[in-house]
Amino acid sequence: MRRPSPAAVRWLILAALLVFWELMPKTGLIPELFLPPLSKTVAVLAKDWREYASELSVTLYEVAFAMLIACGFGILTGALVGGIALLRDLLLPVFSSLYAVPIVILYPIFTAWFGIGSQSKIIFAGVYGFFPVMLSTAAGIRTIDPQLLLAARSMGASLPQQITRVIIPASIPTVLTGLRLGGALTIIGVVVSEMLTASAGIGYVVTFYRTILDSAHVFGGIVMILMLSIAFDMVARAIERRTAVWRTAERRQRDEETTDIAVKPAAAVV
């Protein structure tokens, strides 16, 4: 008997969850106040899609700028900390300790410094996602085999060639892992900050309708947040697949160059 593929199993699990979502409230096993039927949630999204689209645009704006802070500064700082021994010894323990602190408890400080507008949410979410990106980048650079850099320098590779042919390909897997985690935390940071202090955004929609006990609209906002997270994960996976192909091509090219170097001296001897 042929075993079902992992993709088919995932779709079956998703279908079962959707059926559960629809039937449990209608049968009365779960009160609709706690879990409205799926059909009711979809109807609310279809009816008030303009409101959700408007609030989602605010959240996307804040997520985009927070991603720039988390990913841009995270990669840059991680490259410096991982590549310079002095900075690694001084700063890496500090950043590792800060990563263990629940950053969300510091959000009132961000509101005191930057107000309750989008600026505080962007900076808070950027800092929230900064640490995993930075630590993963530093770890990726630290795991590069020194023999690879030594071999590249001995073959006359310039600094740009060392970066593009050795450092980047060798550190990409861990960097992308940090980007996926940091990006997810950035989205969480934006939504949580909108739920705490905001007058716009998907997090604000969830909090507003929760206060008036409108579960259908609350779950409509949750669905929008899930869609945003799934879309980000799909983009991150697509980037991983592209870089995996690039790394395979780079590895094949290096193997061919190594073979050529080994063959040419042998041909010269003959």
Image (spheres, grey):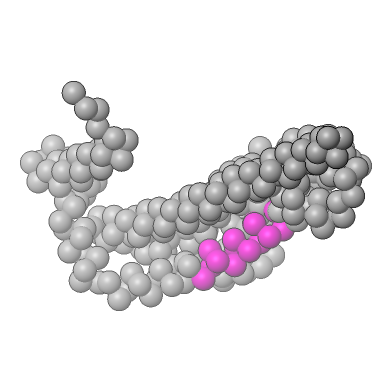
Note whether residue 146 is visible.
no
Question: Is 25 above or below relative to 74?
Answer: above
Q: How many marks?
A: 0
- Image quadrant of residue 56? bottom left
Farthest residue toward the left? 27
Question: Is 58 above or below relative to 32?
Answer: below
Residue found 44% across the figure and 67% down from its top: 201
- Image quadrant of residue 195? bottom left
Place of residue 49 in the rendered image (x, y in percent of width and height, measured from the top left): 27, 72
Q: Is residue 221 left or right of residue 80?
A: left
Farthest residue toward the top? 1
Q: 206 or 241: which is nearer to us?
A: 241
Q: 127 or 252: which is nearer to us?
A: 252
Q: Most prominent secondary structure in the magenta stretch?
A: helix
Q: Which residues, given as a range, are shown in magenta? A: 61-74
Please tell me whether residue 62 belongs to the stretch shown in magenta: yes
Q: 190 or 104: which is nearer to us?
A: 190
Q: Is residue 28 left or right of residue 168?
A: left
Place of residue 1 in the rendered image (x, y in percent of width and height, measured from the top left): 18, 23
Q: 232 or 240: which is nearer to us?
A: 240
